[in-house]
Amino acid sequence: MTDLPLDPIAIDVGNLLHRTVASLYSHLVTRPTGRAVRMAIETQLAELGERSLSLIDLSEVSVLDFSCADEVVAKLLQRYGPEEHTQAYFVFRGVREPHRDPIEVALRRQHLAAVAETAPGRFELLGERSEEEDRAWKILEERGLVTCEDISVLFPDGAQRRALDGLVDRRLVFTSPITGRYHALSRLVAHLM
Amino acid sequence: MSGSLDQQTVEDLLDRVPGPGEGRTLFDARHVRWVDPHGMLALLVAGVVTRDRQSALPRLEVPESTDVLGYLSRMGFFREAQGIFEFDDRVPRRSPGPSEVLLEITPIRANADVHEVVNRVQSRAGAILSSKLGYPPSAVVQFSVILSEVCQNVIEHADGPGWVAAQAYNWAQRIGRWVVVISVMDLGRGFRGSLAEEHAARYGDRWSDATALEAAFLHGLTRFPDSGRGQGIQQIRRQVQRWNGAITIRSGSARIGQVPEWDDTPPLADGLTAFPGAQIGIVLPAREGTPG
């Protein structure tokens, strides 16, 4: 039996840009463009119910400016922040080197972090996070899944466990409401890539 | 006008724009032998201000140099000058230019114009940035982001029309390397006007064009309460610094800049002749050792 009450979806931002904003343009630039794309993503998420995991695919986006990084990444995460009743989890795919700076800047400005695929098959935590959070996230990312029994071995001190739970609160790690197991978001979207 | 109309000489042109009530003005460019994007856009904004102050089209005597005339034509100067200046319409028609033309003079009025600018430079900038400046292939994206943010500044903060242009040159005499020059100018309300409602009271008597420029340029202040705003200029500065480039912004009666060791422009100048809008200049030099 699965312990995952989640049905991850993929949202292709390049495709969304063409369909909803400007069929002639392939770049994610200007704030109104970013806002329109974010609203289109939110419309899709509204149909997913109270708990969702979305793979936001930036692979087809060649230029991403700071305004759009703020709208499409930071404001999207803010909209579904920890205080929201709806549990929305995100993984950003296709974050190539030139995208990285605008996304890092937008996330840090709002004290946010996000899971991102920065090279094929390689995932990183971007944005604002503590050293403990970074370490905890890497341990989980390496294993993909941590059971309750593994916790005391992998995260022996209280600070490390608090960091892991902090990542859950920040929606950077998924914990099963059925088994309490911790899941790396990257593994939960692997079948969509 | 002197023989050179570029980033170093345009302030003289802007300072000398006539006030209201003066007779019809002649812009005499006959002896101009060299012009860059900053010079071209300065001529356009000076022409608009003069036209509006005098309620008549100022006269432009075009350069005698066929090279300069041809270049102005290729950059789309005469197309934009229609309705701003009265000039001899026997100027050369636009012709295919050398590949170093990065971005012809492009009006910025709406977000669609920013998309157009990014689209155009994406197809041209890569080869120039790598072959002339020695930048890595990914630099074309960062270059596009700079243009996008600086053009959005016109739409979101100036609240008035503007122009952008970019070109690559061999600055053999000045720094012995190739450079890319980007110029963006508008005739909107300027940085002081944009920030006044939100921030002037906090500065009290110190509020001026210079403090408004410092607030936006150094501290990322913006008129929007949204904390995600104000990143554009900050991040342009950071990227320009990474490439050892220079950026200056003149607005109202002040000018602020971030300049590397090869540029002797003072970082802040105040008490200039007041001029509407904002004039932004960016110079990106080739990496040292890049063959020209």
Image (tube, rainbow, N blue to C red):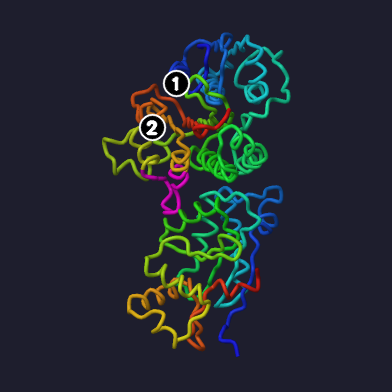
Residue for point 51% across, 32% down: B289
Tell me whether marks 2 and 1 sit on the same chain: yes
The residue nearer to you, when weighing B135 against B52, is: B135
**Residue with the mark numbered 1:** B11
Residue for point 36% across, 76% down: A162
Q: Chain of mark 1?
A: B
The residue nearer to you, when weighing B144 against B163, is: B144
What x and y, as percent, mark residue B124? 66, 37
What x and y, as percent, mark residue B38? 53, 25
Label 2 amino acid?
Answer: Ile
Range of magenta residues: B219-235
* Quadrant of res A42: bottom right
Question: Is residue B19 positioned above or below B135 on the image?
Answer: above
**Residue with the mark numbered 2:** B256
Q: Main secondary structure of the magenta part?
A: loop
- Badge 1 density bin: few <14, some 14–19, many ≥20, Cα 10 Å: some
Label 1 residue SS: helix
Residue for point 29% across, 40% down: B203
Label 2 residue SS: strand
Q: Chain of mark 2?
A: B
What x and y, as percent, mark residue B36? 56, 23
What x and y, as percent, mark residue A53? 57, 73
| The C terminus of chain B - image quarter | top right
